Amino acid sequence: MQLNSFDEWSPLREVVVGSAENYVSHERELSFDLFFHDNIAHDNSPRSEWYYPRLSSRQDGGEDPGGTRVLIKKRYVEELNEDIEEIVATLRSLSVRVLRPLDVAAETGDVRTPAWSASVVPPLNVRDNTLILGDEIIETPPMIRSRYFETQLLKPVFQHYFRQGARWTVMPRPVMTDASFDLSYVRSSTAGGPTEPIGDPRRSRFDMGLEMMFDGAQCLRLGRDLVVNISTANHALAVDWLERHLEGRFRIHRVHGISDSHIDSMVLALRPGTLLVRSEQVAAQLPEPLRRWDLIVPPRPESDNFPRYGDDDLVLTSPFIDLNVLSVSPDTVLVNEACPELMRTLEKHGFTVVPVRHRHRRLFGGGFHCFTLDTVRDGGLEDYFG
């Protein structure tokens, strides 16, 4: 089929599901800690099911310092791979064609640029570095160094759609030295605070000043309209580029600071006129037309919904990660089977819930929406803002 994806809910025909093969570690360095700063707790946080102490801070010194590598237990990766295969099987049972990225090879080394190096991670959260708008693939400028070349592993998929007539665009790639990052948000955030004090950026001969960095998961796609979350100058620069590129085809509505970056564990459009939102406070920050939609605010997640981890396990997401559901049609939604409260809430609103297992979502930074990139849906360039 030809690439066609304008919204988050119309009947899903084709989708990319990410890969976790050979996921062995996270690398704690500046870009990683900035991205996850509100979800990794302070040293003085209470020990509970919800929060875990941060690990040692990144190493300093030199122009290419690398970071502190945190190994992931093999059992967690094996169970994650089992759950991903269950997601794939479930989607196929619903008559959705599933495409997969290339796996990261076991012998893959670091990703390296003239300015820095970082360990490579698999293309698991494929929603992040790509934005599909209608018949166009847009590769977005990455925010985490270890994911800098992640879309290379999606090239066979992109090439397939290009041959079917899709447009294919790559946004400008950042140099990504320390000076590239806008630190003001983490220095002023009260949502949980940074994982560690953020000092002055390390200087590099490659410094460009603040650069555009932005993930596709910061966007809520609503036909002709695109709601985009902006929390830093890096995001704002990227959205400036996106507005110029899309001028005359799409309307961009900026919301500021609705989350650190990604919007899809804060608000998702389940069908025209219905939003799944974390809270009414989140809904109040949305554009006025969306505030008139029906709101589904699920109960707060229960601690028993999540596995218990040890002090050496690095937890990357908030307990609200399971709001990250995937709509297969306007009335059918994939939901983590560990969330009975959320499933009951959606069923009360007339949705058919398809429960799927996903155990370690907090360790790997994503739910069903994060792990997937919908490439073919039935919807078109509709005007849902009226």
Image (spheres, rainbow, N blue to C red):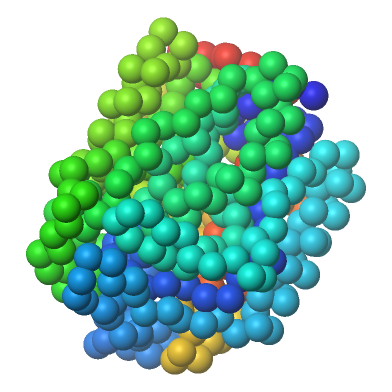
> Where does the N terminus fall, quadrant-wise?
top right
Please state the horizontal and vertical placement of residue 52, each as a whole percent of the image. Answer: 40, 83
Viewer-proximal residue among 131 and 360: 131
Q: What residue sits 28% from the left and 72% below the top?
A: 65
Q: What residue sits 56% from the left and 86% below the top?
A: 308
Asked if residue 193 can be seen in this view, the reply is no
Q: Is residue 220 left or right of residue 98?
A: left
Examine the image and state in which quarter residue 197 appears: bottom left
25, above or below 272, in the image: below
Examine the image and state in which quarter residue 246 appears: top left
Please state the horizontal and vertical placement of residue 162, each as a whole percent of the image. Answer: 67, 24
Please state the horizontal and vertical placement of residue 128, each as a whole percent of the image. Answer: 50, 47
Asked if residue 2 can be seen in this view, the reply is yes
Q: Going by the picture, which residue comes out furthest to the top? A: 248
Q: What residue sits 44% from the left and 91% below the top?
A: 311
Q: Is residue 111 left or right of residue 33?
A: right
